[in-house]
Amino acid sequence: MISTQTKIGIVGGGTTGLYLTILLKSRGFDVCLFERAPKPRVDGCGILMITSGLQALSMYDKELSNEIIQAGIKVSTYEFRNLKGELAFSNSAAEAEAENGFPAVVVHREDIAKALLRRINPENLYFDHSLESVESNNGKVTAKFRNGQSWEGDLLIGTDGLNSKVRSFVEPDIQPSYLGDAVWRGIAPNNHIFSEGEFIVFMRAHGIYANAFNIGQNRCHWGFFTECEQPEDEKGLHAPKNTQMPPEELAKLPDTIRQTIEMTPQENIVCRYSYDINPMQHIVAGRVIILGDAAHAKSPSRAQGMSSGLEDAVAFTNYLTSSTAIDEALATFEQDRLPIIHELQRTSREKSQKTGRTKKLQTTQ
Ligand SMILES: Cc1cc2nc3c(=O)[nH]c(=O)nc-3n(C[C@H](O)[C@H](O)[C@H](O)COP(=O)(O)OP(=O)(O)OC[C@H]3O[C@@H](n4cnc5c(N)ncnc54)[C@H](O)[C@@H]3O)c2cc1C
């Protein structure tokens, strides 16, 4: 067993980093979590958490997974509609629930973040710590932060998301790949339009697609995806410079969802370009490892993003506690986990590319 005196630094306080902090602390390790935001990030929109995400959370304790189920709405059906709003087909969620013992839920990201934060001692959290550089030599890691602080320890874990700084230490050449869509997401008053338990997809056609689901408390989450080429001077940017929704694209949606989008307060809407990252040969370098979106950001087409980060956290904690040395844990985890991650990346990108696009995607493999 690796000594619990092992000093572990985690960079990035999204759901992967928060859950990893909880798990590693529960096994007795000395953990510091560094987050660049000045305070806990409880922003975001609605999330479909598939069964594997709740299963991963239950590995800490069932109370945690139950809390998320209570905070959200259990999905009963996935409905696929055309752009006239007509039902094309629907799938029941019952089979996956019976198979895995957990439902899929739609829930506000804020409820997940708060449930995780409640289980972390604030003494282990360092906000306003934006990582600038990493060094790993002779079994030690040093992390330096923009605020002038530095940290030295035995193992550094990067859970710092799509544009990971830690990844640029592990695999400097990997950059996010543009998936061809600008995405708007928002939370609107539900006004009884979308029923509880229905996850509705307005299938991709004519260069757009959308989804919508009721997350309870009279709130509806929606996502609206429009195919668009990035202008030369916007390549690599988080979001378009002009975040105005194109009215001619919005007009292609059926009235129910279009009106829901139109009634959403501007402050409840976020706009981003959509990216994933190419499968990597390595997620480990020296005593540094990346997990979650930092290692395998994916298209949202299979709703696997958050769940696979939580699964990383469970798996990596188990490798650390069942190995006799840190280097052994890193090497065996990388070897065993990479094929699983690569498969998720491959199928998510494939689904994103196949679903009725008018333009061929130009992502690099
Ligand atoms: C449009 C869209 C829809 C999605 N829908 C779903 C869905 O329905 N279901 C689902 O499971 N997933 C979904 N996802 C994916 C999901 O949101 C992500 O996979 C998940 O949030 C990743 O969590 P993470 O903790 O790995 O990374 P993040 O949540 O990105 O967290 C990274 C953290 O690192 C911090 N950070 C970054 N750089 C630094 C630095 N230099 N120093 C210190 N801190 C730093 C950031 O501030 C942030 O807090 C969707 C994604 C998108 C884009």
Image (cartoon, grey):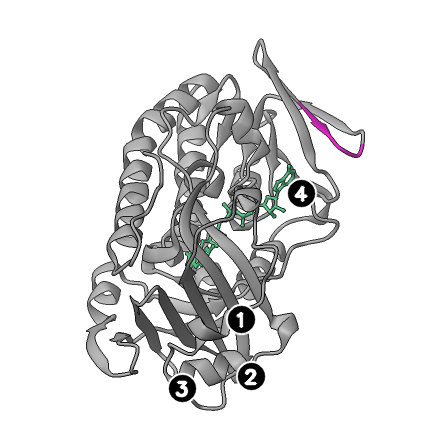
Residue 176 shows which numbered tag? none
Secondary structure of the residue carrying numbered label 3 = helix
* Residue nearest the observer in this picture, 27 or 238: 238
User: Which residue is under mark 2?
Assistant: 263
- The kind of residue tagged 4 is Glu
Residue under the image location 59 percent in, 35 percent down: 10
In this rendering, position of residue 122 left or right of residue 211? right
Q: Is 244 rendered above or below residue 179?
A: below
In this rendering, position of residue 294 left or right of residue 125? left
Residue 29 visible from this viewpoint:
no
Local packing at callout 2 (Cα closer than 10 Å; few below 14, some 14-19, many 20+) is: few
Task: Give me the C-alpha separation between circle 1 and circle 4.
Answer: 25 Å
Residue 186 shows which numbered tag? 1
Magenta stretch, main secondary structure class: strand
Place of residue 66 in the rendered image (x, y in percent of width and height, measured from the top left): 44, 66
User: Which residue is under mark 4?
Assistant: 35
Query: Assess mark 4: CB under 8 A from ligand 1?
Result: yes
In this rendering, position of residue 80 left or right of residue 159? left
Task: Give me the C-alpha separation between circle 1 and circle 3.
Answer: 17 Å
Nearer the N terminus, badge 2 or badge 3?
A: 3
Task: Give me the C-alpha separation between circle 2 and circle 1.
Answer: 10 Å
Secondary structure of the residue carrying numbered label 1 = strand
